[in-house]
Image (spheres, rainbow, N blue to C red):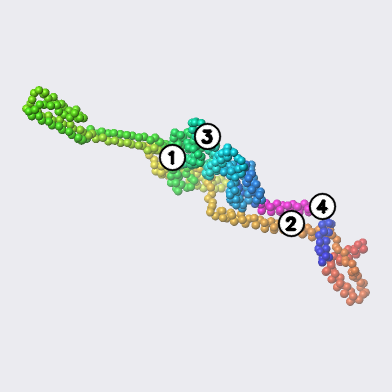
Amino acid sequence: MAEAENRSTMPLVEVIRNIPLGKKISFAITACLLIGGFVALMSWTNRPDYQILFANLETSDAAQIADKLRERRVSFRLEDGGRTILVPEEKVYDLRLELASQGLPRGGNVGFETFDKMPFGTTEFVQKLKYQQALQGELARTIMQFDAVAQARVHIVQPDDSLFVEPEKQATASVVLKLYQGRALDRKQLQGIVNLVACAVKDLKPENVTVVDVNQGLLIGSREDNGVGAMTADQFEYKRALEKTLEKRIVSMLEPVIGRNQVVAKVSADVDFKQVNISEETYDPDSMVIRSEHRQKEKAINGKSLPSGSPDSKYQVYETSGQSSATTKKVEKENSIVNYEINKVEKQIVSSSGEIKRLTAAVIIDGPYTTVKDEQGNPQRKFVPRSRKEMKNFEEIVKKAIGFNEARGDQVTISNVPFAIQKEEEVNVAAAPAWMSYLKKGVRPFFNVVLIFLFFFFVIKPFKNWLSQAKQYVGPAALPPGTEVPQLSAGGQGSGDSAIRKEEILEISRTEPEKIAEVIRSWVREGS
């Protein structure tokens, strides 16, 4: 058994030992390059795909998350100056859920978790200070839940308690926001932030809360105490909403006819936000009706005439002076009072705010195009202007869409010009994700199999061929001791013995050709 093993290992050792030094060095360099290249290619093919775990992190949050990942022995990479952490794709969602359960990232704001490590013997002043800091952090985290808010900080100023009678000071607060690029907060969201902060802080009124954007400046604050700023902002939002509605109406009516992304519409609205109250009172003298009538009649016979009339009468009556000394046989007096009501009409007219005074619309239409060949025969698109009749029809459609009124001075302009925007090719977004996911899953095993075949054909097989060619540097093994080389007899000997010897020589040449070759070499050396 040991002899068989030595026979199988000795040729390889002798081959390597007897190879010239230059060929050994060239073989070692080639083998290292091939093996190193295949190892690098294998590692590059099987490298993990890193995806963003968290971005735009604060330094403290990034440090805590990195420590958690090291504890779990998860490989990660840092980018953007340590503000972005990337982990293998298959672990992104699990790590996000696990870190979120631990309150990471905190966004640079410290919440009520600061009381978890409160040392014994903390003074009341420090407790109040930490409570205010925790309240500010919790409010900032809540405000950051808005989709448009990237970062938020809250500063609260509360008046100190005093033992003396002083004018009451009110609590104030300011909110500093950093919005995502291209996003904004509408009026309702800003008012919601103000009410959120005001309700969370004791004795804080909404008018004492200021909201500031680091890029746009003051969003809401003390300028709105008189209501003028709020009204101006509401008017601007109403105007923009009206213009956007009219623009969408124009595009929705023209795109089915002209084509998608081939219509651009802009509308400018002049809106009157004045609110006028008109009160009118109209009297009609021709429409008189009797409202009340009062008649008084007096008769005196053979008596003294006395003063008459009602002392409480509201109206002046004609008095008849009587005779104080003489007597009359017969006296008659009649008074009549008639009150008329004149027809009166009262009107109170309140004009609505936000009345459209004028509309101006500008519409640009693309196409159509025809395909022509240039001098080299390559197809190109050529713009062909639309006819006047077609443009007139489009103009009528736009006027109907926006409610065109010539009396108030509305204007509509439509132009037909070629667009410089490259049209995007339509992609089947429904089938692409599934196809890409299957390809992504199967590409790595496929590359691994290909690398194994390449390693076999470019490393293993050439190495075997090289070994077979290198055996020329090793001489044949000597004959085993105790065996004699058969001697060829002369031609005068018996035929039976020569036949036996011939068969032995042929058997030896088949089983051990190297021995026969050594014998022939020895004969050649002796003859020379």
Does the magenta stretch mainly form a helix, a strand or a loop? Answer: helix
| Amino acid bearing label 4 | Gly
Label 2 belongs to which residue?
Answer: 459
Element type where label 1 sits in the image: helix
On the question of residue 358 being in view, the answer is no
Label 1 belongs to which residue?
Answer: 238
**Counting other residues with Cα less than 10 Å from the Cα at mark 3, is it few (<14), some (14-19), or many (20 or more)?**
few
User: Which circle's residue, 2 or 4, is located before the other in the chain?
Assistant: 4
| Amino acid bearing label 3 | Asp
Q: Is residue 90 above or below residue 59?
A: below
Disc 4 versus disc 3: nearer the observer = 3
Element type where label 2 sits in the image: helix
Disc 1 versus disc 4: nearer the observer = 1
Q: CA distance from mark 4 to mark 3?
A: 93 Å
At a point 44% along the width and 46% down the height, the residue shown is 252
Q: Specify the segment rendered in magenta.
A: 22-47
Q: CA distance from mark 2 to mark 1?
A: 75 Å
Indicate whether residue 298 is drawn in magenta: no
| Image coordinates for residue 453, horizontal then vertical, percent | 69, 58
Label 3 belongs to which residue?
Answer: 161
Label 4 belongs to which residue?
Answer: 22
Q: Is residue 214 above or below residue 473?
A: above
Q: CA distance from mark 1 to mark 4?
A: 87 Å
Q: Confirm or deny contact between disc 2 and disc 3 (CB under 8 A).
A: no
| Horizontal side, residue 453 vs residue 217: left or right | right
User: Which circle's residue, 3 or 1, is located before the other in the chain?
Assistant: 3
Q: CA distance from mark 2 to mark 3?
A: 85 Å
